[in-house]
Image (cartoon, rainbow, N blue to C red):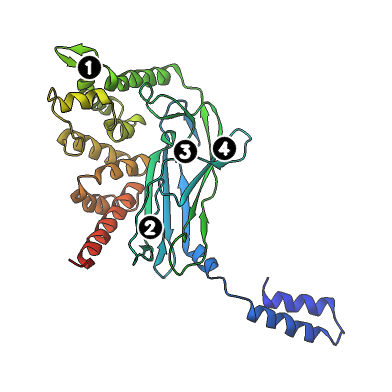
Amino acid sequence: MSIYYLRKQIVSDHHGDATWSTRLVAILFLLAVAPARPSVGMAQQLVLTAGVEKQTFFEGEPIYLLVRLQNVGTDTAWVRPFNLFSPAVTLFAGRGYADPSPVAKPTRNYSMPPSWRGEPIPPGTGVLNTMVLENIFGDEWDSRRHLFTHHLAPNEYELRVEFDAHGGVPGTTPLTVKSTPVAFQIRVATSAEANEVKELEAMRQMGWDTTRVAGLPRAARYSSTLINWVDRRWTDQPDDPFLPFLLYDGLYGVGQILWNSVQAGEVQRFDPDTSEVVSRLRLAVIGRRRGSNEGAHLVQALTARHPDQMVLLRDRLSGTPAGDMARYQVERKQHDQQLKQQRPR
């Protein structure tokens, strides 16, 4: 309520009353001595958004969640580490008519030096993070037999994200930044969609298959089978929603059987982050899906071994989610290098 409105209201309520001016002075005095609330200004400075890009998905379709913490103010914001696995970030989700509740998720532990004062977010910049929602939310099931660690059945869903920005940051007041709720629905898959999910699940199961063919377990053929499938699908249906997932999440953690074969020297270890064919496919899908969460998800995949690509993608894809992710990764790399240079030797 503004001071002008308070004065106008008191004058209206006490017209002709000689005491109204005294009351106005008292109110103005209380407003003047009221304690400052620095967290309000910081809350206006930090903006947290979350999105899944569209409103309807079929059962079994990957849902790419993109979260973004932006500093829209004029001063550097100092916050806790921000990403979907940070203990400072809480995902609330609900289905049907149930109110969203906190989602249990794995978290990363951060060890901070005594001189730590928070992670800086300069004015006009932001922090981005993506993941496939079914790998954190839904009904848990066996990921050895399915594409994701969780299953989302046909229903209505709602989610939001909260960030405890100042917890543990020296010299700050408590501050929780919240995203607006995101609503979406899962529908029953068509026959063609359900068949594709089953095909990909069968391929995923190869990573745990001990059946030997030509002296090697079928698990040893998983990576090449996946890449061949993606290559064909990219030619026939380049907008397939599974392509980003397979080129990122699908290439990791495919089973102990394969790892045992690598350790035994039976097969050569396959590193997707240094594979030329994987990089070619990733860049092709990023170029086509630059304006989507899917494109940002694949840019995040490239950060492991291809920091040189980030500058090119930042400039080429400027103004898109994929370009924003590349820009953030470039800024993050520069910040990490500055910290290394500042550390005493």
Residue 288 occupies quadrant: top left
Mark 4 or 2, which is nearer the eye?
4
Disc 2 to disc 1, how far (Cα)? 44 Å
Residue identified by numbered label 3: 54
Crowding near the residue tagged with mark 3, few <14, some 14–19, many ≥20 C-alpha atoms within 10 Å: few
Residue identified by numbered label 1: 218
Q: Residue at x 58, y 41 (%)?
A: 100
Provide the secondary structure element on which disc 2 rests.
Answer: strand
Residue 328 occupies quadrant: bottom left
Tag 3–tag 4 contact (CB < 8 Å): no
Quadrant housing the C terminus: bottom left
Amino acid type of the residue tagged 4 in the rendering: Gly
* Precedes in sequence: disc 2 or disc 3: 3
Residue identified by numbered label 4: 94
Residue 317, horizontal then vertical, whole percent: 29, 49
Q: Is residue 214 left or right of residue 107?
A: left
Q: Residue at x 47, y 22 (%)?
A: 189
Provide the secondary structure element on which disc 3 rests.
Answer: loop
Disc 4 to disc 2, how far (Cα)? 27 Å
* Precedes in sequence: disc 3 or disc 4: 3
Q: Is residue 340 left or right of residue 318?
A: left
Residue identified by numbered label 2: 126
Tag 4–tag 2 contact (CB < 8 Å): no
Amino acid type of the residue tagged 1 in the rendering: Arg
Mark 2 or 1, which is nearer the eye?
1
* Precedes in sequence: disc 4 or disc 2: 4
289 vs 146: above or below: below
Q: Residue at x 22, y 62 (%)?
A: 340
* Precedes in sequence: disc 1 or disc 4: 4
- Which mark identifies residue 142? none
Provide the secondary structure element on which disc 4 rests.
Answer: strand
